[in-house]
Amino acid sequence: MAPADLFDVSGRVACITGASSGLGRQAALMLARAGARVVAVARRQEALETLCDEAGTTSSAVAADVADRAAMDQTARRIAEPFGAPDILINAAGLNPRQPADDVTDDAWDATVEVNLSAPFFLARAMLPAMKAKGWGRIVNFASLQSFRAFPAGIAYGASKGGVAQMTRAMAEAWSRFGITANAIGPGFFPTELTAAVFADEDRAARNAAQTCAGRNGRPEDMDGPLLFLCSDASAYVTGQILMVDGGFTAK
């Protein structure tokens, strides 16, 4: 296989959750531009339609709540309707209530774990039979700095993202023999809706940038190459890994 072909995802069907904003949106646009047929999933229909207008005709929107486990099979069927069953699943939907440990509410804890940890597993499981039948699949979960580091007011989010790291390894152990790799991306500080409070504080954003080896915070396009790698044949023998895309934050 030619080196350029290793990264070729043209014709692949890619489902991206959390695609209405942030890094999920970036992933959807990148894969569409790389030639994949993209199914963008999020709760906000209008934002999804705006994304699809930008991504082009090989994209489709599915407005759904991935945390609604009772509707998961139905959601998976809707995702498969436009282009067929997905070859690639990117679980980018996320929730961070930013509550101090003493103040975490039951509802916030449950919602965070459901969106960040449970939904990626149950959606992947719903898509597994079609991937097994093809003998090829790529699952990319979203881990976090908080998969490995404790941050203030981050106990619910950190617990869920620590779970994502281990879930990714367990997915790899269970499914890689069928040609389905499971890996996770661990973003550093990128400007998204979830990190709006961080970037609104210029001093805090500057401190985070200084903590990296690169000396800056992430830009949306910094995610394109790592995601394309994990979604393509280039990563065929990479599975069960967490790729930190953090400018070296966790290296210091």
Image: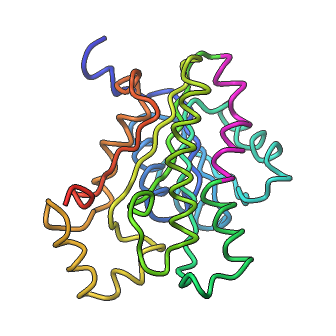
Main SS, magenta region, reads: helix
In which quadrant of the rendered image does the C terminus lie? Answer: bottom left
Q: Quadrant of residue 57?
A: top right
Percent of width and height locating residue 89: 57, 40
Q: Going 68% across and 53% down the picture, which residue do you hit?
A: 118
Q: Is residue 51 above or below residue 130?
A: below
Q: Which residues are magenta?
A: 118-133
Q: Nearer the viewer, residue 250 or 96?
A: 250
Q: Nearer the viewer, residue 13 or 145?
A: 145
127 part of magenta stretch: yes
In which quadrant of the rendered image does the N terminus lie? Answer: top left
Percent of width and height locating residue 125: 71, 36
Q: Residue furthest right?
A: 70
The color scheme shown is rainbow
Q: Going 14% across and 60% down the picture, which residue do you hit?
A: 214
Q: Residue furthest top?
A: 1
Q: How many marks?
A: 0
Direction from residue 127 to residue 91 in the image, left or right = left
Q: Going 34% across and 27% down the picture, which residue do you hit?
A: 7
Q: Quadrant of residue 235?
A: top left
Q: Is residue 39 above or below residue 106?
A: above
Percent of width and height locating residue 18: 57, 58
89 part of magenta stretch: no
Percent of width and height locating residue 134: 62, 16
Q: Nearer the viewer, residue 144 or 70?
A: 144
